[in-house]
Amino acid sequence: MIRVEFFHDVLCAWCYALSPRVRRLVEEHPDVVVEHRCFALAPTPDAIVAIFGSKEAGKAEILEHWRAANRNDDQHRIRADLMATRPFDYPWSMPGLKACKAAEVQGGHPAHGDMFDRVQRAHLTECRNIADFDVLRECAKDVGLDVSRWERDYHSPEVQELVERDLARARIYGITGVPTLVAEGRHTLVGAQPYHRLVRWLEEVRARA
């Protein structure tokens, strides 16, 4: 088996473009097992201001990244113009990451992946506020989780610790951006690569195993 760690953030439009390709890779290559890992682009509520200077400037620049990522996305699902009309502040990473990790506690990495994709759809296609706990709870229901259990896990210190472990693992690998794939703990592929590049990378990993 080839173990692939998929480092991603719920905020990341490029991760949204890559995720369906990773799913296809697993479907077409049964020896690949994906482990989902958290990475926080905006780890605190004030991170957007710290990075960009203001909430408004941050949202405007991030939406330009959305537009670029939408050109990369195979189905062009990313709706920057709709998000530009939303009155809420651009969200931060941790609520969505904890939501995904709470899903993982309940259903392993497959549940993490399902929750990640659903939260990203809420963020990048539906343009809802994924810092809102009610939105995240609805996503948990949509992917078939036991919502009461998910809610308890979400608020637990154990889930917070699991997220922190993923962030620490990213630092150990030297990861500075997402999406990033790491195969067998040493073979790295960065960015929303086209599917044929993922297949070629997998072949290279197999050859080096």
Image (tube, grey):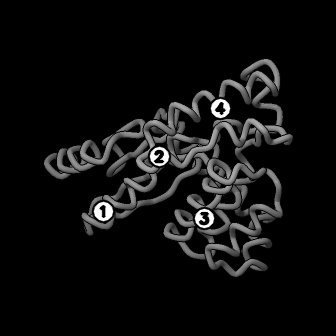
> Which of 174/131 is in front?
131
Residue occupying the point 33% across, 63% down:
26
Q: How far apart are marks 1 and 2 (CA)?
A: 19 Å
State the image quarter where residue 147 is shown: bottom right
Q: Mark 4 points at which residue?
A: 63
For disc 3, the marked residue is 115
Q: How many labels does the image show?
A: 4
Who comes first in sequence, dot 1 or dot 2?
Answer: 2
Mark 4 and mark 1 residues within 8 Å of each other at the beta carbon: no
Mark nearest the camera among 4 and 3 is 4
* Residue 195 percent location from the top left of the image: 30, 48
Residue tagged by mark 2? 17
State the separation of the CA atoms marked 4 and 2: 15 Å
Q: Which amino acid does label 2 sit on?
A: Ala
Identify whether 201 is placed above or below 161. Answer: above
Around disc 4, counting alpha carbons within 10 Å, would you say few (fewer than 14), some (14 to 19), or many (20 or more)? some
Q: Name the residue under label 1.
A: 32
